[in-house]
Amino acid sequence: MRAAVRLFLGVLVILCLASSSRGQAQVGEDVVWSAYGHDAAGTRYSPLKQIHRGNVTKVRVAWIIHTGALDIDTELKKKAAFEATPIMVDGRLYLSTPFNHVLALNPSTGEKFWEFDGHLDLSHGYSEVTSRGVSFWRDAKAIPGEACGTRIFLGTLDARLIALDAMTGKLCPDFGSAGFVDLSANASTTPEWRGGYQVTSAPAIAKDLVIVGSSIADNWKVDVGRGIVRAFDSRTGKLRWTWDPIPWANSTNPHTGAGNAWSTLSVDLEHDLIFIPTGSASPDYFGGIRPGDNKWANSVVALRASTGEFVWGFQVVHHDLWDYDVASQPTLFTWKGGTPAVVINTKMGHVFVLNRLTGAPLLPIEERPVPQSDIAGEKSWPTQPFSTISLVPEEIAPQDMWGKSPEDVKWCQEKLNASRWEGIFTPPSLKGSVVFPGNVGGVNWGSAAYDPQHHLMFANTNRLIAWVKLVPRAKYDAETNTSQDNRIYGEFGKQQGAAFGLYRTFLFSPGGTPCNTPPWGTTAAVDLFTGKIVWDVPLGSYIPGQQTGTINLGGPMVTAGGLVFTGATMDNSIRAFDSESGKEVWNYELPAGGQATPMTYSFKGKQYVVIAAGGHGKLGTKQGDAVIAFSLP
């Protein structure tokens, strides 16, 4: 009997210790952040809870380093955006700068182990000047300590895929041509602007394959590069497969390009699947040259990761006329009853929850009639998919206009009344159409975080009114020289090869604030089992003392400590919210804009939270080059 009791107590102690080890994952071993979105599934969830809702107010700066990214003589600095999320694996922190330098850092001090210079050609322009991160690959066949047995992969602004030795930062000579592959080859890129075909997101890793899409400047002309996704052998750089999202574009005249995957891909190794988020076919705002629903642009597509074979696809927007790319990384999670699932966040704020293996909806989706185009030569699609979950309002009216003064409100009301507006999916027009939410989102590339313990998803949203006007080709050059109603965030797009160019902006009052009623940016929590929004709180502020929310670029991450960390805002702060209530429990003002997604890891028993604080040139936040780590004292 006593022996049985001792055996029972021994088993109980072992179970308790095992449970404690699982819950306190940082004890006794490092806890990594091995991919841009924490893991291949893009969950942005860490089991760490050394920093939790009860002690987060004690968090302090542990170390800060400066990358020197802006210490170069180029006009491109004005467009630079430090959007990187570091990864931490094998006791090293790896990240990339906007100009394609890669740094390996000591996780506890920030001390630099090595730096690689991508030798980017700075003599011409680039559509985007950013790099969101790098990827790590371990060669299972390598001898421990062998050169390039572990590799860092980087995609560059000038369309190269580079392989580096993770220990030394030196090029891996057996990969491609002395360490890199030219991605512009066979992509129908045009010589007049190589800076319009780029890689800005971290490559995906699927066993021994490294898989990349591309970022394409799709409003400058119709005939831009092919939006193909390609898989390369991680050892040799040899091409293994190619998938074209819009093969029908080969028969359009002129050739329609893009439909590209510029955001982050997700991988399900267990089921040999890779999930591809795609953008619009070119150009964004006129589809007369690309009739039909334009599959598989504006979609999430599941491919067989090993072969590139098409498995299923879901199109979030048919025949896009609004620049509603799928900008967010698909999030892979387990739904009710163990069902493998994927959640798709969109710029419209629609959230689609699908069976990961079949693409079948797990929460209802309805095709609804939408307003139709009145532009000659345009045939918009009659319906669009609507989800059970919508993170942003879809209706605005004159009484919803807002401003610091009555004059501001009046200006906004008059602008709305003079524009075409018939609800979400109102097509572009000659007099100008309101697009709400605008092309910045809803949810943009910051993507979502998912807490599997409470089946809660967290996402940052934008709530801004965009205004789009089509300009007939014959009048385009003259129009670009005239004064526009609102040049804040305004830009022209030539859309060369189409019958219309475009002008687009966001509706800001003369007083400088958005025309719609705040909040203009939020962080929201959604129960993905029920589709219900649990909380939705303003993120940042344009006006001191008021919770207005701001435009935000960057995403959240969530921890087992009950905290949602996010930067992203125009007020240059990183914040922590209580994951259950949405209450802000910590705030730190960064030295520059935090237009990046934070990450966390533990190293030698201590948990760190890290964010890149370098600002965003196009957004207009304060620029810099800092990487900051926080920890408890």
Image (cartoon, rainbow, N blue to C red):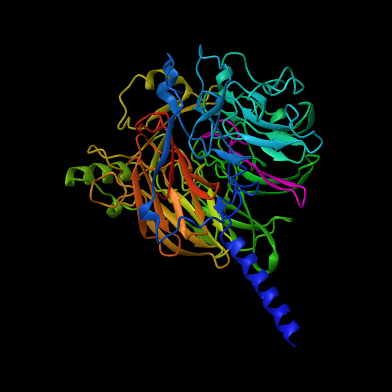
Q: Residue at x 45, y 58 (%)?
A: 52
- Write down the quadrant of residue 9 in the picture: bottom right
Q: Assess whether residue 265 is covered by the magenta stretch.
A: yes
Nearer to the camera, 294 or 301: 301
- Write down the quadrant of residue 228 in the picture: top right
**Looking at this rendering, what residue extends furthest in the left direction?**
406
- Image coordinates of residue 72 in percent, x first then y, are 44, 16
Tally of numbered discs? 0
Say above or below: 222 vs 533.
above
Which portion, as a residue range, is magenta?
A: 261-287
Nearer to the camera, 520 or 39: 39
Horizontal side, residue 249 vs residue 504: left or right: right
Residue 340 shows up from this direction: yes
Nearer to the camera, 315 or 111: 111
Q: Residue at x 61, y 14 (%)?
A: 191
Main structural element of the magenta stretch: helix, strand or loop? loop
Horizontal side, residue 62 vs residue 310: left or right: left
**Looking at this rendering, what residue extends furthest in the front direction?**
2
- Image coordinates of residue 313 in percent, x first then y, are 69, 48
Q: Split into 4 quadrants, where in the image is the N terminus?
A: bottom right
Horizontal side, residue 335 vs residue 219: left or right: right
- Image coordinates of residue 438 in percent, x first then y, are 43, 43
- Image coordinates of residue 320 in percent, x first then y, are 56, 41
